[in-house]
Amino acid sequence: MNINNEDQAREAIALWQSDPPKAQLKNLRLALESLELSQMYYEQKGNEQGAARAAACQTILACRIAEIETE
């Protein structure tokens, strides 16, 4: 799933919540990695809004990862 904004990040989390925790973590980490690459791309292009949006999505996904790991 391609995540481009905070709403899509929340939708992805909701979609994956029915999966087992290990599968959720895998999906979340892959999405997080993709967002990190997107953020670097936006930073190189000077797109501050894009970089900030990617960072906000990363924060949302990282919070979900932390929730799963503490369950």
Image (tube, rainbow, N blue to C red):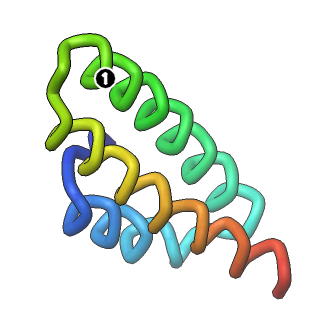
Residue occupying image coordinates x 31% and y 23%: 43
Q: Nearer the viewer, residue 50 or 30?
A: 50
Residue beneath label 1, please? 43
Q: In this picture, is 70 found above or below 54?
A: below
Q: Residues within 10 Å of mark 1 (few under 14, many from 20)?
A: some
User: Tag 1's secondary structure?
Assistant: helix
Q: Nearer the viewer, residue 52 or 10?
A: 52
Return the residue found at the far top. 44
Q: Where does the image place residue 30, in percent across and percent down from the top left?
A: 56, 37
In the image, what residue occupies the spot 67% across and 47% down?
Answer: 26
Q: Is residue 11 left or right of residue 68?
A: left
Quarter occupied by residue 35: top left
Quadrant containing the N terminus in the rendered view: top left
Q: Is residue 38 left or right of residue 53?
A: right
Q: Amino acid at mark 1?
A: Glu
Relative image position of residue 71 (x, y in whole percent): 82, 87
Name the foreground residue: 31 vs 21.
31
Q: Is residue 30 above or below residue 43?
A: below
Q: Position of residue 70 (x, y in %)?
A: 84, 82
42 over 31 or under it: above or below: above
Residue drawn at 25 percent across, 24 percent down: 42
Q: Nearer the viewer, residue 13 or 35?
A: 35
Q: What is the residue that sits farthest to the right in this orientation?
A: 70
